[in-house]
Every structure is written in structure tokens, then in C-alpha cells.
Image (spheres, rainbow, N blue to C red):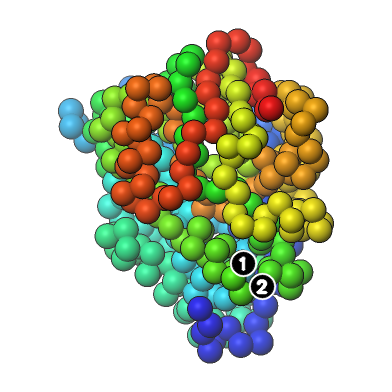
Amino acid sequence: MDHPASAGIKLTALSHGGGCGCKIAPAVLSEILRNVSHLPAPAALLVGKETSDDAAVYQLNDSQALIATTDFFMPVVDDPYDFGRIAATNAISDVYAMGGTPIMALALVGMPIDKLPTDVIAKILEGGESICAEAGIPVAGGHTIDSVEPIYGLVVLGLVHPDRIKKNSSAQPGDKLILGKPLGVGVLSAAVKKGRLDPAGYRELIACTTKLNTPGRLLADVSGVHALTDVTGFGLLGHLLELCRSTGLGARLAMERVPLLPHAASLAADGMVTGASARNWDSYGHEVDLSNSVTPIQRALLTDPQTSGGLLVSCTPATVDEILDVFRREGFAQAGVIGEMAAGPARIAVA
């Protein structure tokens, strides 16, 4: 969509990175956190930092637990309204990835006031509020600063029954892995920044990154769903490795079954690959076994940073059809089985 406020403004030119590609590389993040003290956690804190889950969860009573998460980043597209929509969808996703229902949000806004007109900034916030309205939640407040680069995101709170929380650490051997959205967001975003993405490709990018991961709250009620996360800045391999490490299990992926955005492979072959993809591989490639049939372009797509990416589900084989039916009803036509969890060391084998 084209908004008058965006005329002549290239948001992506004002930032050194964009979307979840802005994330600190996994290896660097691990080094940073290694020396951070871990204070004793209260018993009511059901999910904290230990398992690299998508959000913190604090038990309120026998039937309610509070989910708390935050996510923000720099522009992944130039249109301010679309940037706001993408950032909000991405932030709300972490509540769905815990099996929860969002209840409210707070806006996090950092903008270069000397470079961006106020109407452009207002369009970013308007885009974010439009997605919150789709999710049925208010933006109840927030915080703003004058920053060097444009930054926008949300704090999101949600609720879940304490017995239905979906964590990273509960996958089991033999579980099937289902991916809800196609990969390639980072590649298409790189093409946007280089002026190489056509209007049809842009529409595909926006449709994917502004689609709320609503199946997550429905999957909370499916007992056969053992683990749930969403695929964002560390790429499919990075977030699957978080499941593997949390459970002490391995995983097998079938490359030909991994859904991709249209033209993602051809754009990657033309050099539209983010620097974050290479940083991701450098961080965890030693934990991944690639067969000779996996090409460098396919490897780049498996490590491609996803902004507002899809849910990754670990479930019993018997519940696959039920789960896929949930995805289909919620409008996720490309959701499908891409592999399985397996006994063994915490590694991923890709064939």
C-alpha cells in the first residue's frame, strides 16, 4: 500500500540493518549473557531465560499465567505504515508462540526527529495499532525517544492456562515438525533495500510478515503439541537448534519440504542474502550436518533471518492432520511437515 507520508522517504536507508536481521548473532549473544548473573527466580516464574523461550511466563493463579514479551527493530521496508504493521505482528507472535492470547500492548518508539517528518512517524504508529486492532488488543501506552535510527516495536502481554503453556523444552523423539510460514523474508527484504523487489514480490512479503500467528493460541488446547516457537532472526536452523538444546534431542529436516516465498531462491542466487544469514551460520553451523545435496543457496535460506516468521511446531505424528487443519482454517495454506525430532545429540541433519 502506498501512503502520501512515505513519498521521498526511504526508511531502510536510515538504518544499518532491518527487521529481525538486526538481532545480535547467536554466538555473540551467548558470549554476552555468559557472565550475566542469574538471580534465584520465584516459583511463580514458570518460564524464564533458561530455555531460550519466546516469552516469560508468570503464574497468577490456578487458571491464569501472564505472558510478557518485547520485540523491536529497525525498518525492514520503506513504507512507514507497513513497517509499523510488520513490527507489531512480529512482537505479538511471541505470545501466540507460547500458546497464549494477547491482551494488551505498549509501544516502543525511537525516531530520528531531525530526519523523519512527524506524519511519517505517525504512520508507523498507525500501522502498529492497526495490527493490534486485528489481534483484539489496545496499545495502552508506551515510551518514545529521539534516536539516531528509526526503531519501533511493542511490549506485549498475554494470558495462558498454566497447564497449556507451550515451551521449547518439551519436544519428544519421533515428533513431527510443522512450519507455519514460508522462509525467505530476509532475502526479499534485502531485495527491497537494493531496489530489486517487484510489486508482486512486495505484496508477498507484506502478506507474510503481517499475518498474525493466531494458530498458536488454538494449539495450546492440543495435547499432542509438545513444543512451540516462532522462527525469527536466527533463521529456521537457529530456532530449531533452541528446541534441540532444550530437550537434548536431534532433528532431521527434508529440504524439499521446507516452504519458500516465491522467488526467494532466485533472489538469493542473485546475491540478495543478508549479512545476518552468514553470521547465523558462523554461530551455529558446527551443530548442523548438511548432506551433499544441500546447495549454498539452500543453506542461506535455512539461516535467513525471518521477520515475523512462522510458528514451528513439534507434535505427535497422530496429531499432524489436526494441527494442519488448524493452520488451514486460520489461512496458512503453506504450512506443512518439514521434518522430525530424533533421539541423539542436539544437532540438525538436513537432507
Q: Is residue 210 above or below residue 55?
A: below
- Quadrant position of residue 257: top right
Amino acid beneath label 2 = Asp
Any mark on residue 201, and which? 1
Observer-nearest residue: 324 or 240? Answer: 324
Q: Secondary structure at mark 2?
A: loop
Q: Is residue 213 above or below residue 124?
A: above
In this picture, residue 125 sits left or right of residue 25: left
Seen at 79% across and 38% down, the residue is 295
Seen at 57% across and 45% down, the residue is 259
Any mark on residue 198, and which? 2
Q: Is residue 201 above or below residue 242?
A: below
Residue 28, horizontal then vertical, whole percent: 72, 37
Is any part of residue 67 visible from this angle?
Answer: no
Seen at 67% across and 31% down, the residue is 30
Any mark on residue 89, and which? none
Is any part of residue 296 visible from this angle?
Answer: yes
Circles 1 and 2: CB atoms closer than 8 Å:
yes
Seen at 28% across and 30% down, the residue is 222
Residue 132, horizontal then vertical, whole percent: 35, 62
Residue density around tag 1, few if under 14, some if 14–19, many if 20 or more, within 10 Å: some
| Quadrant of the image containing the C terminus | top right
Observer-nearest residue: 152 or 247? Answer: 247
**Cα gap from disc 1 to disc 2, whole angstroms:** 5 Å
In this picture, residue 89 sits left or right of residue 295: left
Residue 147, horizontal then vertical, whole percent: 63, 68
Q: Is residue 190 above or below residue 119?
A: above
Residue 64, horizontal then vertical, whole percent: 22, 35
